[in-house]
Image (spheres, rainbow, N blue to C red):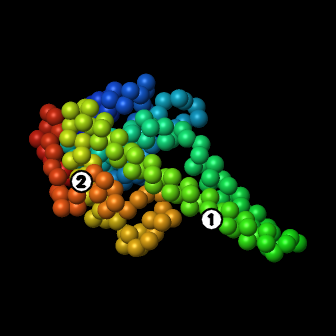
Amino acid sequence: MNSSTAGLAELTATLRRAARLPGLLVYIAPELGDNAYAGSRPCGPAPLVGIGADLLDDSRSAALHGAVAHEIAHHALGHVTSLVVPALERVAAWATVGAMLATIVPAPRWVPLVLVAVAAVAYVTAAWRRRATEYAADAHAVALLDAAGLPGAAIVAAMLTEDFATEPRWYARGGWLIGSHPLTRSRLRRITSLDQLTPQFTAPGFAGGAR
């Protein structure tokens, strides 16, 4: 086990205990790049967190600490196992298929219009709920990091600041309305003011700061 994976193991164990999760399976996924993922496995009950290989470039970075805390927070808050958003997305998908079929087979003109409206409402509602879970996970990540003896707000704000610098313009100009994540600027506002975009922290046992 090298220093990067050893640091990751120590971090996840500390945050898992803070989140009071009975178990946690963490894996390194090169395809995630500098992102992380919270999910589950049908063949096992343990919460699953995927960590992008690029996040391990610096095991002391705010990006790694914040991302791990954020994904564990999703599990602690029950977001991964909630059935509401998947149900809404299925309604949107089936209503879209139904609207397409209604334009092919004989059907009253109002049928495809109603189905399109149902699909749109379901999709927008699902996206809104996903954005709400991101806000909640940010706030809970701060609490978990604080419980682990780390400066939670500074770490999460530093992580979001890096995301803010690379956020696509099209997303900031309205794409977020149908996206699963809120604007990074809005997430930052809930953690700290935009006048403090370069918070620093030092992880216990290490000498370093935000990546």
Residue 166: give x, y in percent of width and height: 31, 65
Res. 56 visible in picture: no
Quadrant placement of the N terminus: top left
Label disc, if present, on residue 192 of the rendered structure: 2
Q: Looking at the image, is 176 positioned above or below residue 4?
A: below
The residue drawn where x is 48% and y is 62% is 179
Seen as rendered, the residue at the extreme top is 22
- Counting residues from the start of the chain, the first of labels 1 and 2 encountered is 1
Q: Looking at the image, is 75 positioned above or below residue 169?
A: above
Res. 115 visible in picture: yes
Q: Amino acid at mark 1?
A: Ala
The residue drawn where x is 45% and y is 48% is 133
| Mark 1 vs 2: CB contact within 8 A | no
Residue 209: give x, y in percent of width and height: 15, 47
> How far separated are the C-alphas under marks 1 and 2?
33 Å
Q: Is residue 203 left or right of residue 20?
A: left
SS at circle 1: helix
- Number of labels in the image equals 2
SS at circle 2: loop
Q: Looking at the image, is 64 positioned above or below residue 22?
A: below
Mark 2 crowdedness (10 Å alpha carbons): few <14, some 14-19, many ≥20: some
Label disc, if present, on residue 57 of the rendered structure: none
Which of the pair 56/16 is nearer the observer? 16
Q: Amino acid at mark 2?
A: Thr
Q: Name the quadrant containing residue 69.
A: top left
Residue 42: give x, y in percent of width and height: 59, 35
Residue labelled with disc 1: 120
Residue 148: give x, y in percent of width and height: 25, 32
The residue drawn where x is 22% and y is 58% is 193
